[in-house]
Image (cartoon, rainbow, N blue to C red):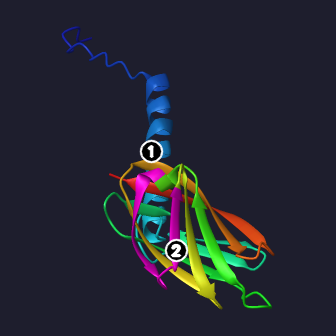
Amino acid sequence: MNTDAPPSLQIHQHLDFQRRFRVVRMVGVGLMVLLLAGALSGLLGDGGPLSRAHVDSGPLRVEHPRFAQRHARVPVQVQLDPAPGGAPLVLVLQGPLVGEVDIDHVTPQPEQVRHSAGSIECHFAEGTAAVALQLEPDGIGRLEATVRAVAADGGRGEAVPLRLFVYP
């Protein structure tokens, strides 16, 4: 019998650690796949199904991007079914977003604009059914406002939320 055999190596396998590490690694891979799928579907860019928001409330419809970059133009489309009498339209934008954005351009040009603490009122001519706003966010993070369309004669008023997340 040969007693001069080399000693065997004692390698610690740490099976519990290996199992936990495998689970953590699989969760990480799953999160990366979800992030990639979100990016491909438009979550992180323009043109995808998750990149724009459409909010309806009765005759009022607001369309805007969900995500924006600070100091980049953000198009907001407001559409309203015309009033039966063709009354002038008052578009009111109110909430924390008002203090965090600059309004670069409004189409059609409002006849009158009123600023007050936390709100902006734009008065439009009779028959106005669509308004395009170009906003430029100064803030970062989640910005919220309420878009309200009211006939100048006080006949109707619909409101929808406008939520925007702004990247630096």
Q: Is residue 128 above or below residue 14?
A: below
| Residue at x-position 67% and y-position 83% | 88
Q: Quadrant of residue 7?
A: top left
Q: Is residue 101 magenta?
A: yes
Q: Quadrant of residue 119?
A: bottom right
Q: Quadrant of residue 2?
A: top left
Task: Choose mark 1 or mark 2, whichever is in front.
Answer: 2
From the image, tell me which residue sits under label 1.
28
- Range shown magenta: 99-115
Local crowd size for mark 2, using a 10 Å CA cut-off: few (<14), some (14–19), many (≥20)? few
Front position in the image: 163 or 89: 89
Could you tell me which secondary element the residue under label 2 belongs to?
strand
Q: Is residue 97 left or right of residue 84?
A: left
Q: Please name the amino acid that badge 2 sits on.
A: Gln
As drawn, the label of residue 112 is: 2
Inspect this view and state whether residue 65 appears: no
Could you tell me which secondary element the residue under label 1 belongs to?
helix
Q: Is residue 106 magenta?
A: yes
